[in-house]
Each structure stands twice: as structure tokens, then as C-alpha cells.
Image: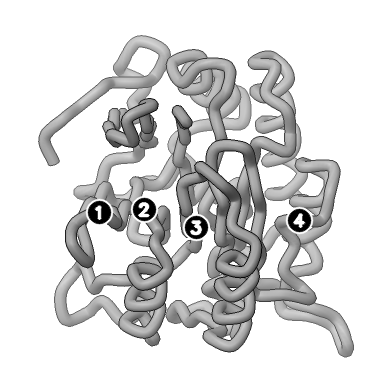
Amino acid sequence: MAMTILHISDLHFGDPKAALNREDVSRVIRSLLAKAGPDVLLVLSGDISFKGQKQGYSEASDALRSALETSAIPRDRVIVCPGNHDVVKPTAGASPFEAFDAWSADLRNDKRCTFSANSCRRVICREADFLVINSAYHGDIEYGLVDLTKLDSVLADMDAAPSQGSLRVAVLHHHLIPFSGYDDKSTTRNAYQVLTRLVRHGFSLVLHGHQHALLELGLGDGSMKLCGVGSFRYITPGFINGASLYRKNERNQMSANHFAISKDAPDFLRAFTDF
């Protein structure tokens, strides 16, 4: 079964120094969705708001709703997970992810991508069987961690009731391979245990954000691709804001198109192949 995924991450709505305003973001996402086609799955891998600001989630809702409605993309075609910026210091008895969950439930019109009660969720679409992971579930914004007990539970459910003909795709915020040298302390701490499980359970694609960099790596026998994407609107010296478009054809062949986001480019997008 053919499949198209548009992967964006680290939107940081509410950041006063952001490279793009809300209207710019809607414009870029509309352009990307047009390139993707009508049956696209939109993956947002965390850091929706900047430092968990309530206003950030409000801005994210406005920008994404506008783009989705204009492009006629059903809301349940959006897959979302929290990032470290989506952790909010809770009041007594509350979850650090209440603000994120309220935003996600409103955007999707369901609670399938909410994480206060479960750190790992399964979301089934006709082309892909998603494992959506909250790698910030532990509440520490300094590094990633995956709840292996919950992960094993969801993997067991996927194996017990497999989605026939669907690609297995994992989504989380934090990267799983150290990237920026000795100072990179924010990697997912139990990444080895996570990756060996994903290889063993037949995943084809792992999508993450956090590092604000385009990353691609084949794992296992090379059939599982680990893919990071640049920030969407963050000003980071030496890094390129961007988005990635992944396609699988009827012969299960995967291809990728990568786009840099720049106000100097037509529709703010510039395709590139070398990184």
C-alpha cells in the first residue's frame, strides 16, 4: 500500500524570537501539504509550544487548523507526540502534559495522541501502524527516556493484532543516537533497549525531532530508517529549519524529499539533497 508522510518538528509556538510568524507557518505547511498530495499523514514530533506556554498552544491550533482546513486534510491524519518544551510544571495531582493533551485532543478531535495516562500509544491508519512515544514522560527536560514497560505492552498489542499491509512507524521527540559530540547529553538514555525492540518488531521508520538537524541512518539489516528533521521555525546558528516528505510506493520502496525553510525561497521552501 502506498503511503506519504510529511514530518515536521520543533515548531516552538510562543517563541518571541521565532524565524516565522503564525501566518508564515500556515503558508509553509499548506505548501508542503500541496507537495505531499491529498492522502498525506502529517507527523509532528514534539516541542509544539515554547516552554509549554498556553499562548503557544493557541497559536499552534490557529496555524495548523488553517493549513489543514485549506488543504482538506482530516484531523485524524495528524500524528503528534510531546517534546521537552511541552513539559509543564504541574500543580498537585495534575499531569505535566495536560496542556499538550488538551491541544492534541482539540486538534485531532479524539484522545488517541494524549499522554497523561499512557506514555506510549498505538494509532492505526490504513497505510501505517504508528507507535507514538512520549520520550519526555519522566518530566525531566534535560534528556529523553522511554518507558520500556509501556513500550513492551504496546508492542505486544501490535503483534497480537497486526494491521495487515501497514508499515510500522515509531514517532518520538528525542533523538536516539548522540549527534553533537561530547556535549550531547539530551539523547534518549535507554536508546539501545528501544532500538533493539523496534528492529525486532519489524519497524521500517523511526521519526524524531529535538536536535534541529536532518539525520538519516539505517539500522538492523538497513531496512529500518532512523530519521530526524530540522526545527520548523527556530533560530539556531549553523542549523537549517526544514521538513521531510517520505513516500512508500506499492512495491514498498521508500523515497525521501527534504526541504529547507527560508524566507528567501519561493513559498519559503527550497528542496535539497546534500546534507
Q: Earlier in the sequence, mark 3 or mark 1?
A: 3
Spatial separation of the CA atoms under disc 1 and disc 4: 28 Å
Spatial separation of the CA atoms under disc 1 and disc 2: 6 Å
**Crowding near pointer 2: few (<14 within 10 Å), some, many (20+)?**
some
| Residue 236 picture location, percent across and down | 31, 50
State the residue position of label 1: 223
Spatial separation of the CA atoms under disc 2 and disc 3: 11 Å
State the residue position of label 2: 204
| Residue 188 picture location, percent across and down | 39, 78
Say which amino acid is labelled 1.
Ser
Instruction: Identify the secondary structure beneath mark 4.
Output: loop
Q: Which mark is residue 22?
A: none
Residue 25, placed above or below residue 177: above
State the residue position of label 4: 112
State the residue position of label 3: 171
How does the figure colour the protein chain or chains?
A: one colour
Q: Earlier in the sequence, mark 2 or mark 3?
A: 3
Residue at 48% x, 42% y is: 18
User: Contact (CB < 8 A) between labels 1 and 2?
Assistant: yes
Residue at 67% x, 23% y is: 73
Of tags 4 and 2, which is closer to the observer? Answer: 2
Examine the image and state in which quarter residue 116 appears: bottom right
Residue at 50% x, 57% y is: 171
Spatial separation of the CA atoms under disc 4 and disc 2: 22 Å
Instruction: Identify the secondary structure beneath mark 1.
Output: loop
| Residue 266 picture location, percent across and down | 35, 10
Examine the image and state in which quarter residue 64 appears: top right
Spatial separation of the CA atoms under disc 3 and disc 4: 14 Å
Of tags 3 and 1, which is closer to the observer? Answer: 1
Of tags 2 and 3, which is closer to the observer? Answer: 2
